[in-house]
Image (cartoon, rainbow, N blue to C red):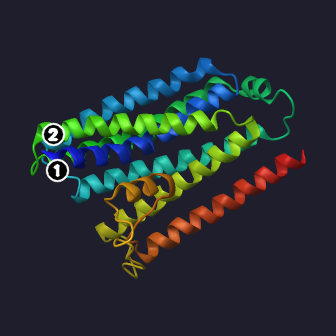
Amino acid sequence: MLVGLLSGALITLREGMEAFLVVGILLCYLRKVGAPQFKMYVWLGTLVALAGSVVLALLFQLLAVQFEEESAEVFEFLVSLVAIAVLTWMVLWMQRQSRGFRGEMEARVAASMGEGQAVALGTLALVTVIREGLETALFLAALAQSVERQSLLMGAGLGIGAAVLMIALIFQAIIRLNLRWFFIVTGWMLIFIAAGLVGHSLMILNETGLVPPVVDPVWNTESLISNESLWGKLLHVFMGYEARPSLTQVIAYFGYLFAMGWLFQRAVLVSRER
């Protein structure tokens, strides 16, 4: 029972934090810029994603498709690409919103928001949550074959609760920042999340044989911080940590991180000069 409890909790803690982190940033963003009327789009995208994750997971089980099989990996890769694209757009768009504003920035940013941007925020919530939700459901379904189902579900519930609590505590501190620093902090958080998705996408391509790993692994830090440990899962959420990455994963991860970091930091410097 203890194995199932811990396994379920660790899986949902990591996947839940990754999804709730993005949703939390979106909700805090709308609160900071004084546009709470658009929160419904974020919540709608989240709820649709949760429902969609359950339906897709059930279909995968009915069709006897497991997460390790190529069809599921291709699906996850495509969803990851969409999430990377939307996260990239979100980082740059949020920073553009902060340019040239002084004094009453919140009101001026809120005034610049339209329904199109709000729909885009809801889409980001949908894509992020459905990716994590589906991955969680498939992981739990695979584990259910070897551990007690009831303890696994109890652990999953505890993991989700812990993820919500940790994200809430993090954003209690972030929401107190002024709008400029809020954009910078949340922007970097989104960049690291997207870089982690880029690295994960390359891992999928390595596993399916579409892209050779070249060197696998480049390093092995399993003995220091295992992928399956609590710290490993938390670092994966916030920084895209991988204990045994291939060379193509490392190149893709740091390539995206440096390219986006440079674009983002340049935008920050431009907005500071105005």
Q: Callout 2, which amino acid?
A: Ser
Q: Quadrant of residue 100?
A: top right
Left or right for 71, reference 24: left
> Is residue 218 visible in the rendered structure shown here?
yes
Give the residue displayed 32% in from the left and 50% down from the top.
75
Confirm or deny contact between disc 1 and disc 2 (CB under 8 A). Answer: yes
Q: Quadrant of residue 159?
A: top left
Q: For the residues marked 1 and 2, what is the alpha-carbon distance in whole angstroms?
A: 8 Å
Residue 217, placed above or below residue 206: below
Between 188 and 205, the one nearer to me in the picture: 188
Left or right for 22, reference 108: left
**Which disc, if any, is residue 3?**
1
Left or right for 143, reference 205: left
Give the residue displayed 22% in from the left and 58% down from the top.
68
Q: Which residue is mark 2?
A: 151
Residue 50, placed above or below residue 155: above
Picture coordinates of residue 8, whole percent (x, y):
24, 44
> Is residue 120 visible in the rendered structure shown here?
no
The N terminus: image quadrant: top left
Give the residue displayed 57% in from the left and 48% down from the top.
190
Picture coordinates of residue 254, whole percent (x, y):
56, 68
Residue 177, placed above or below residue 6: above
Residue sticking out furthest to the bottom: 215
Q: Helix, strand, or loop for circle 2?
A: helix
Considering only order in the chain, which callout, 2 or 1, is on the residue closer to the N terminus?
1
Picture coordinates of residue 267, whole percent (x, y):
77, 51
Q: Helix, strand, or loop for circle 1?
A: helix
Residue sticking out furthest to the front: 2
Q: Callout 1, which amino acid?
A: Val
